[in-house]
Image: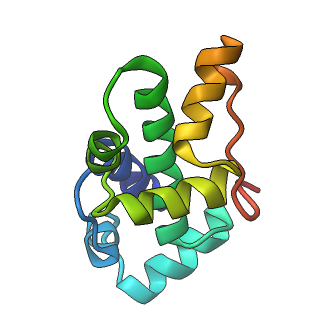
Amino acid sequence: IQISPALDYLLEHYAEQIKIQTLADVCRMSETHFRRQFEDAVNMTPVEYINLVRIQKACELISNTNDNMDSIALKSGFLSQSSFNRTFLKLVGIQPLKWKQQIKNNNVNSVNYKISAHEGWR
């Protein structure tokens, strides 16, 4: 898959501010071509995918640490608590603090969390 280098890069650098041009560069494509190839392969935009990866990492941190939500937001690559909360709600369907309480109260295995993307992988 032509975008594999970008996917690998994202998994390693999700906590950093990532420019789409950087992802295109690691795939040796123009940004426009990269965006087309990425959406064809993943069925979501690069930004949507970056947010998905970041929220997955946040869920891991919420489940496995006692860090506060501000710290989790920053460690997951979000610049603000509000953007973290908004993105988490959009993808998981519940606010992060409420999700943490559900995990804790229900003793739910962290692998059971469901994160939905618009379309996901084809």
Write the residue at 49% across / 79% down. Answer: 35
Q: Is residue 112 above or below residue 85?
A: above
Write the residue at 35% across / 84% down. Answer: 30
**Location of residue 64 by image quarter:** top left
Quadrant for the C terminus in the image: bottom right
Percent x, y for residue 60? 46, 28
Quadrant for the N terminus in the image: bottom right
Percent x, y for residue 120? 71, 56
Comparing 106 with 108, the one in front is 106
Q: Is residue 52 above or below residue 65?
A: below
Q: Is residue 79 visible?
A: yes
Q: Is residue 1 visible?
A: no
Comparing 35 with 18, the one in front is 18
Comparing 28 with 46, the one in front is 46
**Location of residue 26 by image quarter:** bottom left
Q: Is residue 61 above or below residue 51?
A: above
Q: Is residue 32 above or below residue 102?
A: below
